[in-house]
Image: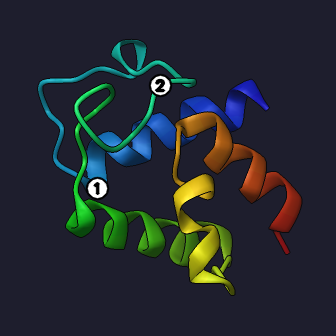
Amino acid sequence: MEELIEQLKQQLIEELNLEEISPADIDAEAPLFGDDGLGLDSIDALEIILILERNYCIKIENPAQGKEIFYSVRTLANYIRENRK
């Protein structure tokens, strides 16, 4: 699980062009969106959807779940672990 979390952190940095951030700077429990965490926005959410589809062959079937799935790096990792094909 920790390996998947580190992998996700690296993918987020690369895909979202967060050059000023290192994986160590990202708290796996912190919110990804809003002022409390990384401060990502809706365009970043689309990029995360692409990361899930491209790297893990996962499609989010129920968009209403997006808010809880995308809450933090750890919730993303849990979703990937449970839904990876």
For residue 15, which numbered disc appears in the image?
A: 1
Q: Residue furthest bottom?
A: 61
According to the picture, the residue beneath numbered tag 2 turns out to be: 30
Residue at figure coordinates x 72%, y 25% from the top left: 2
Q: Residue furthest left?
A: 20
Residue at figure coordinates x 44%, y 34% from the top left: 31
> Residue 12: percent from the left, percent from the top?
37, 46
Disc nearest the viewer among 1 and 2: 2
Residue at figure coordinates x 43%, y 75% from the top left: 50
> Residue 44: percent from the left, percent from the top?
27, 60
**Which image quadrant for residue 28?**
top right
Q: Quadrant of the N terminus?
A: top right
**Which image quadrant for residue 23?**
top left
> Residue 21: percent from the left, percent from the top?
22, 23
Please say if 77 is above or below 70: above
Question: What is the spatial separation of the Cα atoms under label 1 and label 2, in whole angstroms?
Answer: 19 Å
